[in-house]
Amino acid sequence: MVRDAGALRRPPPIGPRGLVFAGIAAAGVWSFVLLDVPAERLLPGSGLLPELRDLRVLGDFLSRAVSPALDYESSFVPDSAPPLLMKVLDGAHRTVAYAAMAMTLSLLLAFPLGFVASSAWWRGDPARVTTATRFVPPLLFGGVRALIAFMRSIHELLWAIVFLAAMGYSTFAAILAIVIPYAGTLAKVFSEILDEAPRDTALALQATGASRTQVFVFGLLPRALPDMAAYAFYRFECAIRSAAILGFFGLETLGKFISSSFDEGYYGEVWTYIYALFALVLVMEWWSGALRRKVTA
Amino acid sequence: MNDRVRCIADLHMQRPRSRALWWSMGALGLLGIYSWTWGLATGDLSFGDTFSARRLQNLERFLGEIRPYPLHGVEWDTGIALDWARTLMSEHGYEAMVTTLAISVVAICMAGLVGAMLALPAARTLARADAYLPTAKPATRGVRFAWAALVTVTRGLMVFLRAIPEYVWAFLLVTMLGVTAWPAVLALAIHNAGIMGRLQSEVIENVPPTTPATLRGLGATRSQVALFALMPETLNRFLLFFFSRWETCVREATILGLLGMASLGAVISESRAGQRLDEMMFFVLVGSLLVVVGDALSILARRLVREAG
């Protein structure tokens, strides 16, 4: 009795959370020390402190944050060029449109992949076990899971680079670079949502004699769809960011405008584009956040 | 019989559904249709061009070139391929992998610290005149306004930090700070500080008010409440976010190297610039391996945290 009370008062000196913290601290310090050395050794001549000239550039750039450009900063603007603000709108439009295209393809791929990758899809009738049902499902299940893990594990920019090297630049290839990892991520999350969805309706349907397909389509899927939809909307928000970034690799979006204006030193224009991207992401974040709160509430 | 029908009708009415969700999905669907129509109509998106004979020829050349170069025009030999891979790994691979991991770890530590700080003035339950303690005389309008302003400014700052993608931050920073690992670290830290701050502030707002109110009643200040009531109660959720964001940091740290900084991305873009496509593909696969390793570590750590309760 007395010993038990003592044990209650004194927890072990280091529990699992303590271990996690110790791990983080050790990894942090070790990484910090490590970064110092190779950063200088790998790239000779680049000191850690920025040069004076760079500091002036930094100051110039930051000071334009409060006065983004409303018109082109270049003294030579071709007559055919649209006004800057129209160009900003065009960039935002393209960013959203490319993201939407990537999203439609990703969803088309993610639904079948996600179904096959969920264990709920394979939850079968134990009475009807044949050689085929014993070996084919595990193979398909494992194969599709491995496939979506692979699709996810390569970042959209790396897919973009691979496609650039393989086929040269095209808009469709850039969109495809977003589609592959996004379809993988969506499929993984869809399969998890399906497996965690409440099974009450599914069990009721099964009890009344519905077939496996009917149980899945009418019992399980409707319970999972709201979560799946909310997640898809969140991924659309991410797709907008990804589409913007693919601009640095040639896709005609805000990212491309940011990089070309920055290279020319037109910092005011850079901030205009940055604020446009900010506004876009802000609206989407508010929208998808509100949806997720509705669905989880 | 009629009763049963009504019962079912009632059940039907009670089913969970969200108009907003279906309107939003409808809007997204329409946007998808519009975008494809626009893309195909303006000719930005030509399948004929994407799969033209020239491009397919490129693809064929590419598929030939990603074969490890000691094996060009020779029968496949796993031993030679392994030797080639081992050389690549010892020349650049290991170092780049370790640097990528180090960048992600330092970045997430910085983001975690800054995010945890930013979360306090962003939490509406804490950053207010009568935090956890209804006072006898209500605060003046000026004081209440000042607190509300603090919350709004902090939240606005966090939104801005996270709305700009890491890659854009890194692109801007690399010109100013030079090509070291630090632009990558800072870019990741800035973006993730905004995310961690938002998540943590939501967790703080959802803390049941009992413990903080007790401390407040005993005369604790706001910072004491934050340190001794809010931190212990939110620590687990914070660590869960910490590790799931770290996973993303590993991915992004690889990518940011494409701007020239010492991570795997730098090695990838160097081999691409040198037209060594076999090496490029090899390092892309190494990158995907690194992501898998990062995911596994993070899942392990999160399981430990959950066990701790």
Image (spheres, grey):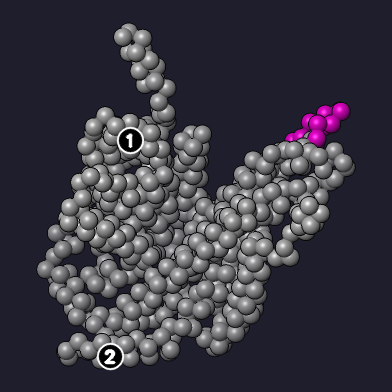
Badge 1 sits on which subunit?
Answer: A
- Residue located at (71% from left, 52% from top): B232
Amino acid type of the residue that numbered disc 1 sits on in the rendered structure: Ala
Answer yes or no: are tags 2 and 1 on the same subunit: no
- Left or right, B241 with respect to A258, comes to right
Q: Position of residue B267 (x, y in %)?
A: 41, 80
For disc 2, the marked residue is B79
Residue A153 falls in image quadrant: bottom left
For disc 1, the marked residue is A202
- In this rendering, the answer to whether B94 lies above or below A287 is below
Q: Which residues are magenta?
A: B133-146
Badge 2 sits on which subunit?
Answer: B
Cα distance between the residues tagged 2 and 1: 52 Å
In this view of the protein, which residue sits in the foreground, B253 or B230?
A: B230
Confirm whether residue B242 shows in the render.
Answer: no
Residue A156 falls in image quadrant: bottom left
Q: Position of residue B289 (x, y in %)?
A: 40, 72
- Residue located at (16% from left, 89% from top): B75
Give SS at disc 1: helix
